[in-house]
Each structure stands twice: as C-alpha cells, then as structure tokens.
Amino acid sequence: MVGNAYDRKHPAKLALPRTLWDAAQRLKKSKAGRELFGDAFVEHFAATREWEEREFRRAITDWEMARYFEII
C-alpha cells in the first residue's frame, strides 16, 4: 500500500465483514477456507459463530435498558 489507505476506495469484495454473521457467511462460501481447514471444520465453526450472533441479538444491554426505560 502506498499512501493513506483510508483515503482510497476499495472493491466491496475486499472489505472486511461488518458483523460476525457476515463473517460466518463469507467463511462458508470461502473456497480457500474449505481447502485449508476442510468442510467439516468450516461448517461447524460457521455454525457456532451464527449461534453466537443469534444469542448476542437476544441480549438486552445496559444502554438499551437505560435508554428505553427513560422514555416510558
């Protein structure tokens, strides 16, 4: 990389996933990941990250409690 990487536009396919769910989906589609780690590992690991993301979305944070209790 020459120059400031933050000032450059990069192809969307090179962007890092923004969520754990998106990362798991990318891993499941990764030919390199499957060649390096094997299908069984990729499927299992991606499934555990999908589970973790679902559990995270079910959690209510302290910020949410404080924010929404103040308006009711």
Image (cartoon, rainbow, N blue to C red):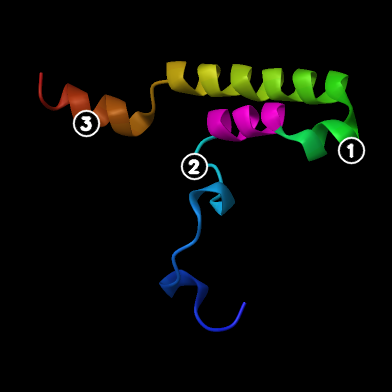
- Residue at which label 2 appears: 18
Instruction: Provide residue 52's location: percent of width, then percent of height.
Output: 60, 22
Choose between 13 and 20: the one closer to the eye.
13
Judging from the image, what secondary structure is the residue with disc 1 in? helix
First of labels 1, 3 by sequence position: 1
Q: Amino acid at mark 3?
A: Arg
Q: Is 60 situated left or right of 38 in this image?
A: left
| CB contact under 8 Å: marks 1 and 2 | no
Q: Is 23 situated left or right of 59 in this image?
A: right
The residue lying furthest to the bottom in this view is 3
Instruction: Provide residue 7's location: percent of width, then percent of height.
Output: 42, 73
- Residue at which label 1 appears: 36
Instruction: Provide residue 55's location: percent of width, then percent of height.
Output: 53, 17
First of labels 1, 2 by sequence position: 2
Question: Above or below — where is 32 with respect to 53?
Answer: below
Q: Looking at the image, which residue is at 79% across and 25% down?
A: 42
Estimate the spatial distance between the alpha carbons at disc 2 and disc 3, rounded to whole Å: 24 Å
Q: Looking at the image, which residue is at 55% across and 28% down?
A: 21
Q: Amino acid at mark 2?
A: Arg
- Residue at which label 3 appears: 67
Q: Looking at the image, which residue is at 36% across and 30% down?
A: 62
Magenta stretch, overall SS: helix
Q: Amino acid at mark 1?
A: Leu
Boundaries of the magenta span? 20-29
Judging from the image, what secondary structure is the residue with disc 3 in? helix
Task: Tell me, yes or no, whether the highlighted magenta stretch contains residue 28.
Answer: yes
| CB contact under 8 Å: marks 2 and 3 | no
